[in-house]
Amino acid sequence: DWIMGDYIAEAVAKIREQVGDEEVILGLSGGVDSSVAAALIHRAIGDQLTCVFVDHGLLRLNEGDAVMEMFEGKLHAKVIRVDASDLFLGKLAGVSEPEAKRKIIGGLFVDVFKAEASKLKAANAGSKGATFLAQGTIYPDVIESGGAKSKKAVTIKSHHNVGGLPEQLGLKLLEPLRDLFKDEVRELGVALGLPRGMVYRHPFPGPGLGVRILGEVKKEYADLLRRADAIFIEELNNWIDEATGKSWYDLTSQAFTVFLPVKSVGVMGDGRTYDYVVALRAVQTSDFMTADWAELPYGLLKKVSGRIINEVRGINRVTYDVSTKPPATIEWE
Ligand code: XMP
């Protein structure tokens, strides 16, 4: 039984010793692991850390601002926000195959990050620039990559967690969460002062809304999806299950909205509408390898569907996904 305060003191000392007076860069995504790694490293070395936050335009509603507010506003960390949405959406135009989209998003991500890293180096002419790349690798990631050879031969979906980046950038690796399980990372995050909502968030895939807009990604679709999804997540947080006292957000492992680029007919007032459809997805799982669809209360579904259709002009139909994994997957792409 270890006390979190002691753990932090120890981890901070270790990071200081490893880094010395050198500089560190870290790719901040807004996810739990990179956020906790950033907070911990910032606690240890302050302004020797520069976070690079690449906004690919496929984040959720207000997500980019929230990340900046937390890390720059509250923690006073150095954060460079790169708005690369035009670049990403431009390269995704006309591409509809899921793996092709993942490859484009993952590849651009690396390109943008590398460009920022060398810009930083140039800006600090005379200094060495960053010599460390920090990553929020956690223990399960370490096991997974170590056992990669024996893993199933077929990759169902490629994850774009960046491999080989430190070598390409000529940087040393700093991975302060390598020994921790997810639960421990979350406890550490709370102890470091990160908001509970950030630390206990559902996982969000690297390609973001890029794989939640079926087929070709368009800005119009992303904007509609962001608004619909924000309503779903807000209502999941607000809907408290009486038996457990927990919100339905906390009772589900992952929940999100999927944009279907098909139009269906509806009525509004005296008129007919011909608008887009979204699907709500909410699952319960312990390992994300198998998953059950969540038996959300009908009242919650009714409220979410009513709000989406009334508040998001352009969407006139909401469906609920009742497929288990397998044979379906959690994401639709
Ligand atoms: P599936 O859809 O394969 O998802 O049942 C299992 C878990 O993996 C996440 N996922 C991804 N995460 N990059 C990621 O970082 C990806 O390309 C990706 N695809 C799926 C998914 O959100 C779920 O938690």
Image (spheres, rainbow, N blue to C red):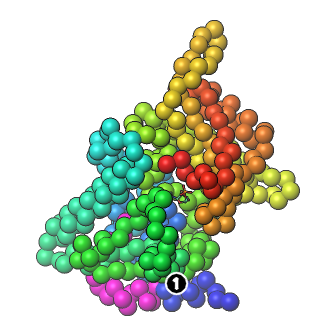
Q: Where is residue 34 in the image (x, y as percent from the top left)?
A: 46, 68
Q: Where is residue 202 in the image (x, y as percent from the top left)?
A: 59, 58
Q: Is residue 16 magenta?
A: yes
**Which of these two is toward me, 163 or 37?**
163
Q: Position of residue 251 (x, y in %)?
A: 72, 57
* Magenta segment: 12-27
Indicate the quadrant containing the N terminus: top left, top right, bottom left or bottom right.
bottom right
Residue at screen point 16% across, 67% down: 122
Residue 149 horizontal side relative to residue 282, left or right = left
Residue at screen point 48% across, 78% down: 150
User: Can residue 74 be seen by looking at this rendering?
Assistant: no
Q: Residues within 10 Å of mark 1 (few under 14, many from 20)?
A: few
Q: In which quarter of the image is residue 280?
A: top right
Residue denoted by label 1: 179
Q: In which quarter of the image is residue 135?
A: bottom left
* Callout 1 amino acid: Asp
